Structures are given as structure tokens and as C-alpha cells.
Amino acid sequence: MNQLQYIVWDPAKEMFRLPFNDHPIVWYGLLFAMGFILGQQLMFYIFKAENKPKQDVETLTLYMVIATVVGARLGHCLFYDPIGYLSNPLDILKVWEGGLASHGAAVGILSGIYFYSKKKAGQSYLWVVDRVVIIVALAGALIRFGNYINSEIVGKPTNSSNGVVFARSLEEKVAMNSFVEKAEASKSQKLDSLDMQAPVILSIDFVPGVNQSQIENYMNTQLYRSLAELSLVNEPHTLAPTSPTIPYQMIPATGGRLRAQVVVAGNPRHPAQLYESISSFLLFLLLLYIWSRKKENTPDGLIFGIFLVILFGLRFCYEFIKENQEAFEDDIPLNMGQWLSIPLVIAGIIILYRVLTKKGQGTGS
């Protein structure tokens, strides 16, 4: 078996914590912010190349930040759990708890650009949209990579030894026990001797004072239940254990602590977040190239139409290999992401048809 066929993925969400701050700095938040920072710098370049006022970029950035966050948050609340959020409307404000929808962000951005362009002479709606979607593609690549770091929006099982085993939920579940100090998952290096398609070594460090008898009882009762519970709710890390008796071995640990190692069956999945991140970055390069060829003479709507067709066309396809985000999606032929992508792809096709059948170049006026 090729040891490179699967990886065990469990990076920390947090980068660091600031003193007297209950909310840590997380990778997802950094990448989200980088999307706006890099996007603003790129927009400065675009506006300069087309002789537009530099100060307008700052105004546009403010519109985009507000429109993206509000649209993405409202989109998640209304598209995926409207009853829950309408019953507790204050929960809509809890952005730090997660829950942002790209389709909602799209609606928010398009709305924000409308209000911005109404106040700016020489910057038509389609002219602005064409430039903004270039940086949206870049931001999308960064945000989806943040989802990958967070081990969220995971793909479906590959049903083979190829893929990514998302192990963070396993570690967090095991570490919740009062006997356990920490748990770490890693890839097994003895693949040929194990009857598993993706064996994962789970190392469990116990708190001082826990004895061998307590560890044995924990491994064959509480750990077994934890693995079974996670598998039952379709958590992304592991398959259900086949026997209540879980074989393990004790190994030396530092500080006089006891450490046990157990092999669990990993559940390799498609890294759907990476697929989307890479394709969004390639789309960004394509759109930037198209703009760079003619700049201000680029037909209005061309870049926007290509963006809609490619981004949401791929999103529709990727949903087939992604786990549904909400339970109600299991009972409908297409999930929410696909239903929301269809009208955007159709809109992109209509825009491209009109652009390609219309003579003349865009001037942004």
C-alpha cells in the first residue's frame, strides 16, 4: 500500500490568543481578512491602470466588507436554517460562531455594488462588477482554504484508501474525558500489517494519577462509545469500531504520565475545500488575464458572465462530492448549494450571450 495515498489532517484552528480576549485569532479569520486586504491592493492597481480615482477604492472596499459579511451571514441563516434563526434573531449577530454562505455573499456584493455605482460617475454597474469579481475569486480561494484548515465543509468518503482523514473531531471528542489530558491523531507507518484501508494512530495522554486499571476500563467502554457516537452522526474522522474490545498499547510519555496508543480506522474523504480553493485561484488568474488584455476596453459584463458560469457551475458539480450542511438536504434531489447555483449559472450564460452578440467595447460609463 502506498503510504502517500491518504493524509491525516488535524491542524489547530487557533493561531494565538490575545491577553484578556475570550475570542482567539484563528486561521479562517486571518484568511478572510487577507481576501479584503489583497483585494483592495489589486483594486488600487486596476483603478490606477484605468485612470479612476484612487480614493474610490477605499469607498468601494467599505461597501464590499459590509455587503459581504451581511450577505453571507443572512444567506446562511435564511437558506440553511430560517426557522431556527427567525425564532432566535439575536443569533444572527453571532458571526464568530460560524455560518457564512457564499451565495448570500454573492447577493450582498451585487447589492453593495449597485449602491456604490449609483454614486460614481464613469463607473457603471457592470464595469464595477467586472472588476470586483476578479478579487472575489481570489478571496474565495483564501476562504475555502480557511475551511480546509478548519476541517469544515468536508467531502464525502472516497470509499478507498485515497483522500484526507479529518481527525480534529476525533481528538476533540476524546479529549473531553476527564481522564484525558490530550489526544493526537497521526498516520500509521505500518500500513501493510494492519487490516484497514486508512489506519490512524490515536495517541492518548492521561492526566497524572490515572492508573492502568482506569485506562483499561476507559479504552473498552468510554473510548468505544465515543468512536461509535462520532461515526453514528457522520463525523468526518473515522469509521465505527467493529468490536467493543479495542486493542491498545502503553508507551512511555514525559513527566511520568501514562500514554496509550490505539489504531482506529480512518475514513478518507474528498478534500472538497481544496478543490474549490484551487479552482477559485485558477479562475482568479483567468479573469485577471482577460482584464489585463484590454483593461478599460473590456466589454462590460464579459468578466462577470465568465465568473458566474465557471464559479457556480463548478460549485454545482462539487456539491455531488460534499456532505450536506443541513439534515433537510438529505431529503431533496439537489442540495441547497446546487439549487442556489443554478440561477446564477443561467444568469451568467444570459450575460455572456448579450455581451458576445453586442458590438462595441465597455468604457465604464
Image (spheres, grey):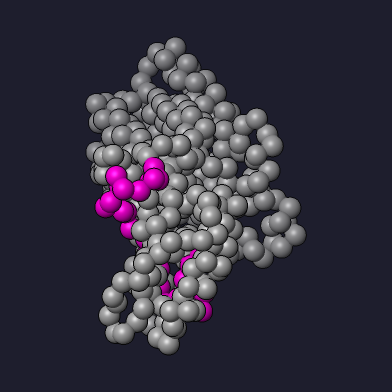
Residue 195 lies in the magenta stretch: yes
Range of the magenta residues? 173-198
> At 49% from the left edge and 21% from the top edge, which residue is drawn?
349
> At 69% from the left edge and 61% from the top edge, which residue is drawn?
89
Q: Position of residue 140 (x, y in %)?
A: 40, 44
| Residue 119 visible in the picture | no
**Quarter of the image where the C terminus is located:** top left
Q: In screen coordinates, is 336 left or right of 192?
A: right
Q: Which quarter of the picture shows residue 303?
A: top left
Direction bottom: furthest residue: 209
Q: Which quarter of the picture shows residue 293?
A: top left
- 286, above or below 112, in the image: above
Q: Position of residue 210 (x, y in %)?
A: 44, 83
**Quarter of the image where the N terminus is located:** top left
- 108, above or below 254, in the image: above
Q: Which quarter of the picture shows residue 149?
A: bottom left
Q: In screen coordinates, is 189 left or right of 211?
A: left
Q: In screen coordinates, is 86 left or right of 105?
A: right
Q: Position of residue 161 (x, y in %)?
A: 37, 40
In the image shown, does 22 or 171 lie closer to the viewer? 171
Residue 251 lies in the magenta stretch: no
In the image shown, does 81 or 363 lie closer to the viewer? 81
